[in-house]
Image (cartoon, rainbow, N blue to C red):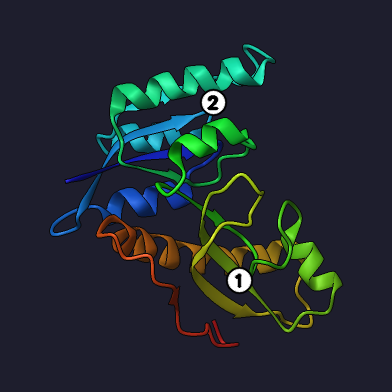
Amino acid sequence: MTRVAILISGGGSNMVRLVESMTGDHPARPCLVISNEPAAGGLTKAAARGVPIATVDHRADPNRAAFEAALGAELDAARPDILALAGFMRILTEPFVRRWEGRMLNIHPSLLPKYPGLHTHARAIGAGDAEAGCTVHEVTADLDAGPILGQARVPVRPDDTPDTLAARVLVEEHRLYPAVLRRFATGDRSRLDLPYASAMD
C-alpha cells in the first residue's frame, strides 16, 4: 500500500478530500498530515479522521535549513512514498525538493503555466481571461513549473470577484486532486483533464 503524507498550512479542505478518497480499493493511504502552522484547522480535521498529525512551526527557527531538517525528520518517521502539498504555504528549497522529486505533488489555483505564485484569481480577472481553473503538478525546484498531471477549468463570469472565482475553482480542486493522486499512486503520470465546468455551475 502506497503511503501518502499531506502537507498543509490552513483549513485543509483539499487534504480532507484526499484523506476521504483513500479508502476501499484505493492504492494509497494517508500516513501523516503535517503543518507549518500549529493552529492550522486542518490538523483537527485530520485527527478526527484518524490520521496521525505533526507540526513543525516555521517561526520557531528562522533558518530555512533547520525548518526543513525538522520537517524531513517528521516525514522520515512516517515513511511516506508520496508527499501531497495541499495549501502548504512555504516555498521549499532545492535540496529538499530534490530529495523528494518525482514523489511530490502540489495543487495550484490557476491554469499553469499561467499565474504561478500568489493572487491567481485576481490576476486572471485582471487579464480579462475567459476561463480559470486549477492544476496538479509535480513539484520541482522551479516554483509552480513542474510537469502538469491534471487540470480542471471553470468559466470566468463578468461579475466575478477574486473570492467568487476562488470558490468556484475550489470545487474543481476537490474533484481534481483526488483523481490525480489515485492515478499517481499507481505510477500513472499521464495528464488528466476533467470535463469543463459549465457556466451554470
Dot 1 or dot 2: first in sequence order is: 2
The answer to which of 186 and 198 lies nearer the viewer is 186
* Residue 180 is at least partly visible in this image: yes
Q: How many marks?
A: 2
Q: Is residue 169 above or below residue 54?
A: below
On screen, residue 180 versus residue 24, left or right, reads right
* Residue 101 % position (x, y): 46, 44
Label 1 is placed on what type of residue? Gly
Which residue carries the number 1 mark?
Answer: 133
Q: Is residue 13 above or below residue 130?
A: above
Q: Residue at x 57, y 77 (%)?
A: 153
* Residue 152 % position (x, y): 52, 74
On screen, residue 19 versus residue 58, left or right, reads left
Residues under labels 1 and 2: Cα distance?
A: 28 Å
Q: Secondary structure at mark 1?
A: strand
Q: Residue at x 67, y 67 (%)?
A: 113
* Quarter of the figure that contains the C terminus: bottom right
Q: Secondary structure at mark 2?
A: loop
* Residue 145 % position (x, y): 63, 57
Which residue carries the number 2 mark?
Answer: 39
Q: Residue at x 44, y 39 (%)?
A: 100
The answer to which of 9 and 91 lies nearer the viewer is 91
